[in-house]
Every structure is written in C-alpha cells, then in structure tokens.
C-alpha cells in the first residue's frame, strides 16, 4: 500500500495527465493481490471457493492492462 501511495504521489507531483491511469493500475494491482490472498487463505483453511456472479479477477486484469497500455501510449506520444 505504501508503494501505491508513493507512486500516486510522485505522478501527481510530476505528470498529472497520467494520474488517472496510475490510480487505476494501483487499485487493480492491489485488488488482484487481495484476491490472491483470499484464494490462498481459503486453501490453507479448507474453506470452499466462492461461486462468482461476476468475474472480479478478470475485470481487475482488464483494468490493469488497459491503464498500463494507455500510460505507455501516452508516454510514447509525449516523449521526443
């Protein structure tokens, strides 16, 4: 979490157009980490996997990939 806060603070101070993408990347990354922790804890403690009505991990991966791509394209356009 501290790494996310630092990353967001640094982008906010230096390159505001990227801020939204950085926030999306950090939120999706932390969400995926939390999901994996939950999966691991269920295995360790023998708790049955939950039935998903909506594929949260897939959505978080999509958000993460999209934000990273947008940031990359923004940097390519604005470097030179």
Image (cartoon, grey):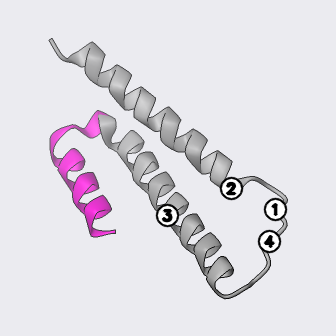
Q: Which residue is depicted at the point 36% across and 20% down? A: 73
The first of marks 3 and 4 along the sequence is 3
Q: Quadrant of residue 80?
A: top left
Dot 2 falls on a residue whose secondary structure is: helix
- Asked whether disc 4 touches disc 1, contact meaning CB atoms under 8 Å apart, the reply is yes
Q: Nearer the viewer, residue 36 or 17?
A: 36
Residue located farthest toward the bottom when viewing the structure as drawn: 45
Label 1: which residue? 52
The first of marks 1 and 3 along the sequence is 3
Dot 4 falls on a residue whose secondary structure is: loop
Label 2: which residue? 56
- Asked whether disc 2 touches disc 1, contact meaning CB atoms under 8 Å apart, the reply is yes
Cα–Cα span, label 1 and label 3: 17 Å
Q: Is residue 19 left or right of residue 45?
A: left
Label 3: which residue? 33
Label 4: which residue? 50
Q: Which residue is depicted at the point 65% across and 47% down? A: 59
What crowding class fits label 2: few (fewer than 14 Cα within 10 Å), some (14-19), or many (20 or more)? few
> Eyeballing the image, is 26 above or below 18?
below
What crowding class fits label 3: few (fewer than 14 Cα within 10 Å), some (14-19), or many (20 or more)? few
Provide residue 56's location: percent of width, then percent of height. 68, 55
- How would you classify the magenta stretch by its main secondary structure? helix
> Eyeballing the image, is 40 above or below 15?
below
The first of marks 2 and 3 along the sequence is 3
Cα–Cα span, label 4 and label 1: 6 Å
Q: Which residue is depicted at the point 18% across and 51% down? A: 10
Region rendered in magenta: 1-17
């Amino acid at each position: 979490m501290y790494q996310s806060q630092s990353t967001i603070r640094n982008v906010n101070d230096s390159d505001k157009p990227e801020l939204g993408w950085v926030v999306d990347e950090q939120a999706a990354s932390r969400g995926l980490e939390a999901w994996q922790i939950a999966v691991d804890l269920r295995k360790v403690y023998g708790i049955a996997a939950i039935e998903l009505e909506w594929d949260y991990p897939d959505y978080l991966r999509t958000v993460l990939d999209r934000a990273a791509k947008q940031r990359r394209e923004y940097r390519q356009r604005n470097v030179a």
